[in-house]
Amino acid sequence: MTTSSPYRARYWQQLADGRFQCDLCPRHCRLHPGQRAFCFVREADADGVVLSTWGKSTGFCVDPIEKKPLNHFLPGTPVLSFGTAGCNLGCRFCQNWDISKSREVARASDLATPDGIARAALAAGARSVAFTYNDPVIWAEYAIDTAIACHERGVRTVAVTAGYITELARGDFFAHIDAANVDLKAFSDGFYRKLCFAELAPVLETLDWLVNETPVWVEITTLLIPGHNDDEAELHALCAWIAEHLGPDVPLHFSAFHPDFKMLEVPRTPALTLARARRIARRHGLRYVYTGNVHDHEGDATRCPSCDALLIGRDWYELLTWNLDAEGRCPSCHAVIPGVFEPRPGAWGARRQPVRVVG
């Protein structure tokens, strides 16, 4: 496969009227030759559907794993992050809109093969590669090929995704993913329809399947937007669903919104709103609830749910305290803390380091 030739996409079928239906995500875009799907990077030609961004990226950077955010997956370690262009959601509040809403495939101008990315991760000292910035679901074939190359070299893989994927495709995609942060935008179908041009149900199905039927380590992020998804009743419903369907051990991150893209008139999320959401989640029995995009040492901390001992202290993306024992247990009461931990944490810190991938 060369990056200059069209990549024949998977997950499509030809309809009786001659159009090609993409079955990768719940939109099921139906395309005549020459048309692009909603995500913009999958398009139809005379022979079916192609992925226009295979082997193309908007750039590479080594980040702290906590930035994804993942707090229970190899804490303190560096992750090589990259994305492409486009998205299969239309979030009016997108905070990576220059990438995810790009209508120019040329925006993804850095050429990189899966093996080149795996080699670059090793050279940079990254313990994992993250498919992020825009949703990797829309470039699933490229992500799968890269994940396979990473696993062959002992590098783990992370997907940062909205979980908007069909049952047909999700098994292939997540079979090669070690950890995922799923962006649960809200707990209202009205919110998804009005502000994301999508639906809530497929996301909940993905979460339920991931947590209960796969070995993928899963954490959830909800960006709280004042006046749109921070209502107390909705937060209670969201947390109750997680507790009932996913269990108390799935980490939940509440992040602060800042005005962006097409919601510049909405104010920033007050820290008090995040603290209230965290209290609600803990009342529903969720054991690991974090706050993001604000300074909040308590909201950053991992505590033992049995004895309340401080196990991991953080300041944004910097680890301040490490009290887990070599087997990932609380040293005070020996409770096992769920996650993917090693005897010692990484020491990457909060650095952000651009990386050039060759080949």
Image: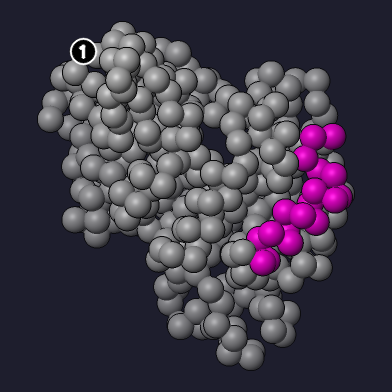
Say left or right for 73 vs 274. Answer: left
Task: Say which residue appears at 49% left-offset and 66% top-offset.
Answer: 212
Rendered view: 206 above or below 44: below
Task: Say which residue appears at 41% left-offset and 12% top-offset.
Answer: 104
Residue 212 in the magenta stretch? The answer is no
**Numbered disc 1: secondary structure:** loop
Magenta-colored span? 227-244
Q: Residue furthest top?
A: 34
Q: Residue furthest left?
A: 1
| Number of numbered discs visible in the structure rendering | 1
Nearest the eye: 228 or 308: 228
Expressed as whole percent of the image width and height from the top left, the position of residue 222 reads 67, 46
Expressed as whole percent of the image width and height from the top left, the position of residue 118 reads 24, 46
Rendered view: 150 above or below 31: below
Rendered view: 301 above or below 270: below
Q: Residues within 10 Å of mark 1 (few under 14, many from 20)?
A: few
Kind of residue at disc 1 = Ala
Task: Say which residue appears at 46% left-offset and 62% top-offset.
Answer: 217
Give the quarter of the figure containing the N terminus.
top left
Say left or right for 98 vs 221. Answer: left
Quadrant housing residue 25: top left
Say left or right for 147 vs 279. Answer: left
Expressed as whole percent of the image width and height from the top left, the position of residue 109 reads 32, 19
Task: Kindly identify which residue carries mark 1.
Answer: 46
